[in-house]
Image: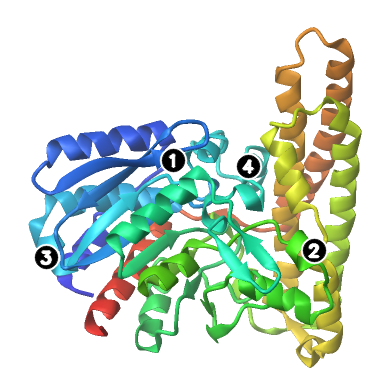
Amino acid sequence: MQEIFQKLLDSIPDYKTFMTVDEMDESSKRLAEAHPECVTLTEIGRSRAGSPLYCLKIGSGPENALLFGCPHPNEPIGAMLLEHFSWKLAESPELQKALGYTCYIVKSWDCDATRLNEGWFKGPFTITHYARNFFRPAGHQQVDWTFPIDYKDLHFHSPIPETQAMMKLIDEIRPRFVYSLHNAGFGGVYWYVSHDVPEIREQMYAAANRQQVPLNLGEPEMPYCKAYAPAIYQKTSTRDSYDYMESNGVTDLANRIKQGDCSAEYAEKACGAFTLVTELPYFFDKRIDDRSESDRVRRDVVLEKLDFEDASNDFIRDAVAAAAPYVGADNPFKTTLDSFTTRSTSGATRKMVQENPEYAKKATVAEVFSNTLVNKVYKLLSFGVLVRMHEHELERAGDDAEKRAAMQAGREKSLAAFEKLAQYLEEAIDYEAVPIRKLVSIQLESGLLVMQYLREHR
């Protein structure tokens, strides 16, 4: 790592909270005013709610890099990276020269939905508070999963306005490097890359090790992930999901898959761009990277996970159905629940684990932990959205006594289920919240490593 890049990493502030969308927009405006010699701020489009989508252009390097935060609205770590990086880059011609890229920076891509997460951005940073204020759109309303795709029987051509704006930007600037600043919620560090980069693999691991944040060595995020090395995966696409379900007997995929493709696929097809995703946890437990053998069979713990998910989804679907007569079509929380409680891959995964001999082996401690506890953390998020669905309608029930009574009853039942699971997880998991500075450091260093690798391997 060059000295100038190390100084950039060392200067990351000790952030205690995350910035709101309005705070990020105001900061970008101040930056453009302070450094007109190297910074321009443009509006690349409007969100579905009519909010401006701002893009900073910094520097004049020979190659273009596109970095965007909040591709999922519950993932603001990357936005804090961009806040720090944009100011330091604008202030230092030396850094601009050493980096060698013209950087296009969108701090909050899904700004509408990010605002629905701001209830937890200022803390306290606990699993319960995070889940109680969490929101994420349904797949067909996610900015990073509504790019066009034509694959076998799947044809998606309904990119939402935010996606259209990003498509236009990619077509115009043709980036060499795309940093899609996602992050996970619980677990450890892992990466997705467009293709294997073995030359910098150990340096990527070292970026996490220096911050004492473990690698995620449990079950991969999706069962069809291809691992290049521990915690380093080939980027995934909707095509991979389609093929996985098709190979495991799922039919009618054109109707089951409601989303499009992702920015990584679009940018690779448009201009051969390399995409990096560095997934980071808000919370971790030391069991997430424990590769010692447990006393349980991997197949059994995966099936236990699927049983829990199916039972939880049944509860949520029943609650949504009971509330349906009183829930408006524009309720964003209901749309999310309809999307997140399908069983589109459950049957395929059950078939796969029954047939794949890898799942007949003893599970590692990390695999047991991710299947029996981490998955419950993610399901707690859906219970939190269910509570918010009822609360959203209560806020606009007005004098409708029947609707108010129904929504209040539904809220109480949903909240009881949420609090029961939250209490169990708070007691069962010995977790700690990772300091934001550490997470920004890992994500920024990983990006710098890949950017320099690409410059050296044209």
Q: Earlier in the sequence, mark 2 or mark 4?
A: 4
**The residue tagged with tag 4: helix, strand or loop?**
loop
Q: Residue at x 17, y 46 (%)?
A: 39
* Amino acid type, mark 4: Phe
Q: Mark 1 is on which residue type? A: Thr
* Sequence-first disc among 4 and 1: 1
Of the residues tagged 2 and 3, which is closer to the observer?
2
User: Closer to the N terminus: mark 1 or mark 3?
Assistant: 1
Question: Badge 2 is on which residue?
Answer: 344
Do the numbered discs 3 and 4 sit on residues whose CB atoms are within 8 Å?
A: no
Q: Residue 66, located in which quarter of the rendered image?
A: bottom left
* The disc label shown at residue 17, or none: 1
Residue designated by label 4: 134
Name of the residue lying farthest toward the top = 399
Amino acid type for the residue under numbered disc 2: Ser
What is the x, y in percent for residue 304?
86, 69
The residue pinned by badge 3 equals: 97
Residue 98: % across, % down: 14, 68
How far apart marks 2 and 4 lie (CA) works out to: 23 Å
Q: Secondary structure beneath disc 3?
A: helix
Give the CA separation, mark 2 to mark 3: 48 Å
Between residue 73 and residue 149, name the one nearer to us: 149
